[in-house]
Image (cartoon, rainbow, N blue to C red):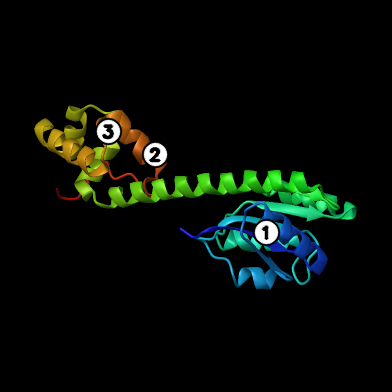
Amino acid sequence: MSSEQVYIVDDDPDVREATSFLVTTAGYPAESFETPEELLNRVARDSAGCLILDVRLPGMNGLELQRELAEREIRMPIIFITGHGDIPMAVEAVNAGALDFLEKPFDNDSLLARVEEAIVADRERRTREAASADIDQRLERLTPRERQVMEGILAGKLNKVIGYELEMSTRTVEVHRGRILDKLGARNAPEMVRLVLAGNRYRDWSPTVDGRGSPGA
């Protein structure tokens, strides 16, 4: 994962310098940019940390930049800083997912508290995403037949019911069940269910337990 940083975008050089100095002295590495385009050329999906954005920016405004970041799947928390006349825009940005907004001139302690909150939130998000990616990789190891049996288990069906629907013996269902638990690293069915639902890959699958039309084992 990328190292955590605070990314600052403000067209006022004094604000950029002061904000960068503040967060750096608090122990957070910082980079500052004059325009949204400069930021977009620097950050990527795996960038870690948080963003401090002015609402009024040259080129695209803060809301447009927020939308562009979302389209690029750059999910670092955003803290907006705003002048009094820009508060409605800042509120709209928060409603769109920004962590918070602070009115200029903002209190240094308030900004640092929000930065710390944002860094923690981003760290937790990346941990969740890494766990989901690991689960998805385990799911990809399942054969088509194991996927069918797993879907039957997720639906709460008994082994004999799954076997009837998939035209296999109860013993064969039990063998597949054991292989599924082993591949997913689960000790039992309830733990398997928690793991599967914590991932993203299963949501993309269409059900394959359809009674008769099943792929081979």
User: Going from the N terminus, do you reach mark 3 or mark 1 first?
Assistant: 1
Name the side, left or right, on which 60 lies relative to 69: right
Spatial CA distance of label 2 from label 1 is: 29 Å
Name the residue: 82% across, 66% down. 14
Q: Is residue 134 above or below residue 186?
A: below
Residue identifier under label 3: 153
Q: Nearer the viewer, residue 15 or 52?
A: 15
Identity, as a three-letter code, of the amino acid under mark 3: Ile
Residue 141 on image: x %, y %:
24, 51
Identity, as a three-letter code, of the amino acid under mark 2: Leu
Residue 133 on image: x %, y %:
38, 51
Element marked by disc 3: helix
Name the residue: 40% across, 47% down. 132
Q: Is residue 19 above or below residue 193?
A: below
Element marked by disc 1: helix
Residue identifier under label 2: 197
Name the side, left or right, on which 26 lies relative to 74: right
Q: Nearer the viewer, residue 67 or 209?
A: 67
Name the residue: 25% across, 44% down. 147
Element marked by disc 2: helix
